[in-house]
Amino acid sequence: VVDTQWQDSVNKERAADYVHCSEPHSRDSYSHEIFLKVSAEDLDPEVIDGEWMGVVKFSKNIIPTLTASMSKMRQETDFNAAKFHHLFTYLVSEGTRVKVVYTTGHWLDIDTLEDLLGAGNFL
């Protein structure tokens, strides 16, 4: 799930999982299937389509592919330092289509105690 209002994110001054997709969010893209092209913390703002919110759903059919890709990643990369955006980009590089669902805000990113304390103002 990708938030298209990434410019307003509390993560502007810290690492975030930005994504570039097959097409940006728009009224026209509402009925289209959108797929991930790349995910990283350091994407050029010109190509960012949103920020991954930390929500993912894996179907049981993808588990063998996911397991195999993670085994390859363990051998080819610094797996212990990997984050989800590394996994998503690796899956795409291996030919897996990662479907994206866009949303527009209305969520809280709680990574720190300060975030949690600030969340009380949301309600």
Image (cartoon, rainbow, N blue to C red):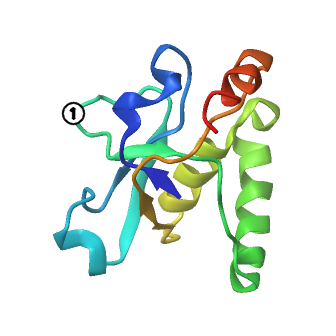
Left or right of 43 on screen, residue 113:
right
Q: Position of residue 89 (x, y in %)?
A: 52, 50
Name the image quarter holding the C terminus: top right
In this rendering, is residue 30 above or below 88? below
Disc 1 crowd rating (10 Å Cα; few below 14, some 14-19, many 20+) is few
Q: Which residue occupies 67% across, 69% down?
A: 57
Left or right of 103 on screen, residue 54:
right
Q: Give the camera-side residue of 54 and 35.
A: 54
In this rendering, is residue 12 above or below 39? above
Q: Which residue occupies 76% across, 83% down?
A: 60
In this rendering, is residue 93 above or below 50? below
The kind of residue tagged 1 is Glu
Q: Position of residue 1 (x, y in %)?
A: 53, 58
Q: Which residue occupies 72% across, 67% down?
A: 66
Left or right of 32 on screen, residue 96:
right
Q: Give the camera-side residue of 40 and 52.
A: 52
In this rendering, is residue 60 above or below 15? below
Q: Which residue is mark 1?
A: 46
Q: Position of residue 121 (x, y in %)?
A: 63, 27
Left or right of 62 on screen, residue 98:
left
